[in-house]
Image (cartoon, rainbow, N blue to C red):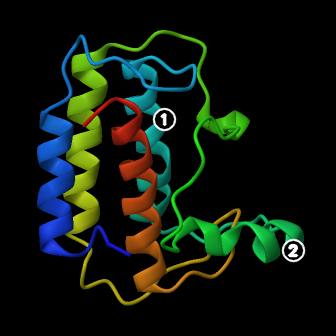
Amino acid sequence: MKSLFNEEAYKEVINRINNLKDNSQRQWGKMSLGQMAWHCQYPLKIAIKNKESDKKANFIIRLFVKKSMYNDKPWRKSLPTAPALKTKEEKDITTEIEKLKELVIEFYALKAREKWHSHPVFGVLTHDQWGKMEYKHLDHHLKQFGV
């Protein structure tokens, strides 16, 4: 499984983001390109801020979903999205893609971080799991838009 902390995977993701165009068409799902770029920023922000969560991770989610966040098995298309990561508003494509790229760069810069707080949904994640989860999420949505 690739990790966003790996230089090669990081460069690949940046290149794929750069290949998104205003006319990039989704292959599945309901999000527009701007909405997808906005959506992909949220998990990166959680990791970058590295704040202790006052939420307790749901045992069922940790048991059945957590491993799927960072294993080699691709996610199926059109998975439901958590309400906090959805927007009904149309988002400016150029602005949201640029913000996404900046957050990917900022996340990669944390490749030497040793202390990670718990994820608000998945609980404790290792450094390796954070890198894999962020890569897998971005990979899924970049494929959604053909890059």
- Above-or-below relation of 22 to 136: above
Query: Label 1: few (<14), some or many (≥20) within 10 Å?
Result: many
Is 18 positioned to the left or the right of 116 in the image? left
**Camera-nearest residue between 116 and 9:** 9
Viewer-side residue, 105 vs 20: 20
Nearest to the observer: residue 108 or residue 26: 26
Tell how many labels.
2
State the mark number for residue 39: 1
- Answer left or right for 51 relative to 4: right
Residue 94 coordinates in the image, percent (x, y): 21, 19
- Identify the residue at image location x=12%, y=35%: 18
- Point out the tag, 2 or 1, that comes first from the N-terminus: 1
Q: Which mark is residue 118?
A: none
The residue identified by callout 2 is 59
Alpha-carbon neighbours of circle 2 within 10 Å: few (<14), some, or many (≥20)? Answer: few
Figure quadrant of residue 91 = top left
